[in-house]
Image: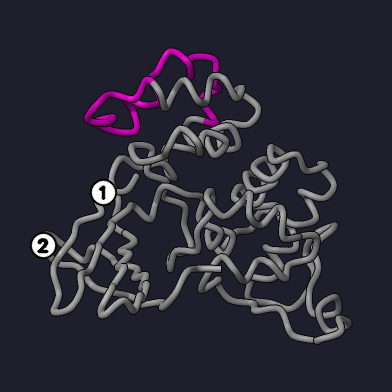
Amino acid sequence: MASGPRFFPLPQGQIAVTLRDAQACFNLNALAQPTTASRPLAVQQLIALISRLDVPAYRAELIAESLWEFIDEDRSVQTRLGREDSEYLARSVPFYAANQPLADISEMRVVQGMDAGLYQKLKPLVCALPMARQQININTLDVTQSVILEALFDPWLSPVQARALLQQRPAKGWEDVDQFLAQPLLADVDERTKKQLKTILSVDSNYFWLRSDITVNEIELTMNSLIVRMGPQHFSVLWHQTGESE
């Protein structure tokens, strides 16, 4: 959810500032979390998310596993369908897999199986935060992002139930994750799934996007900044990006 914009006057112009939560999304860099599992939970959840965007199961698996291979530290192929350096070096413009967390979600456009149409569908749902864990703020997820809940609770939630959960959210949000998991719509979800999700769901955030639209003498400039909360009343800017995100 976003607040604003708020307007501030400048000599010969103005600045419009919009702040929105950066944790109302599926963090792709959670795929980089160290694990001994043959297929990490984050990969399973990403497959479920992509599959709900009118993508065949095989292609969803190919993309999710290839993204995991693209992000993980080694250059060996660990998955059935994932692609590593050999795939990308054979392209007309060859390159190596990053083998490190994404700096921006636009990097996933080069991953095997991805195309422009699917990328546009995923943009409002995913992010690339500078942390190798998943922390999704259920209090700031928009109803239009209900497919994220479907994927996280796969196969326990229908599209109608996922939307209803967000539509029935208390005006001030859920007090904690336990209150959310106790909702009647989640009564049939098994305890193992709830236990897993309790570690990746949150009711507050530490990362935020700040968008600044600056107009001076009819010249317009847009700047996006990622901000992290370091402590009470202590925030730090991690990076800036000039112009619209791709």
Label 1 residue SS: strand
> Given the image, on which type of amino acid does mark 2 rest?
Gln
Where does the image place residue 31, in percent across and percent down from the top left? 59, 59
* CB atoms of marks 2 and 1 within 8 Å: no
Q: Is residue 139 above or below residue 242?
A: above
Q: Nearer the viewer, mark 2 or mark 1?
A: 1
At a point 48% along the width and 16% down the height, the residue shown is: 185
Left or right? Give the position of 15 relative to 37. left
> Given the image, on which type of amino acid does mark 1 rest?
Ser
Instruction: Bin the neighbour count of mark 1 within 10 Å (Cα to Cα): few under 14, some 14-19, many 20 and up.
Output: few
Q: Earlier in the sequence, mark 2 or mark 1?
A: 1
Where does the image place residue 101, in percent across and percent down from the top left? 55, 72
- Check disc 1 and report the residue beneath it: 3
Quarter of the C terminus within the rendering: bottom right
Residue 152 falls in which quadrant of the image? top right
Where does the image place residue 159, in percent across and percent down from the top left? 60, 25
- Range covered by the magenta-colored residues: 168-193
Left or right? Give the position of 196 relative to 110. left
Q: CA distance from mark 2 to mark 1?
A: 18 Å
At a point 58% along the width and 76% down the height, the residue shown is: 100
- Check disc 2 and report the residue beneath it: 233
Q: Nearer the viewer, residue 109 or 5?
A: 5
Q: Nearer the viewer, residue 86 or 33?
A: 86
At a point 77% along the width and 64% down the height, the residue shown is: 78
Furthest residue to the left? Answer: 233
Left or right? Give the position of 66 relative to 12. right
Instruction: Bin the neighbour count of mark 2 within 10 Å (Cα to Cα): few under 14, some 14-19, many 20 and up.
Output: few
At a point 65% along the width and 66% down the height, the residue shown is: 108
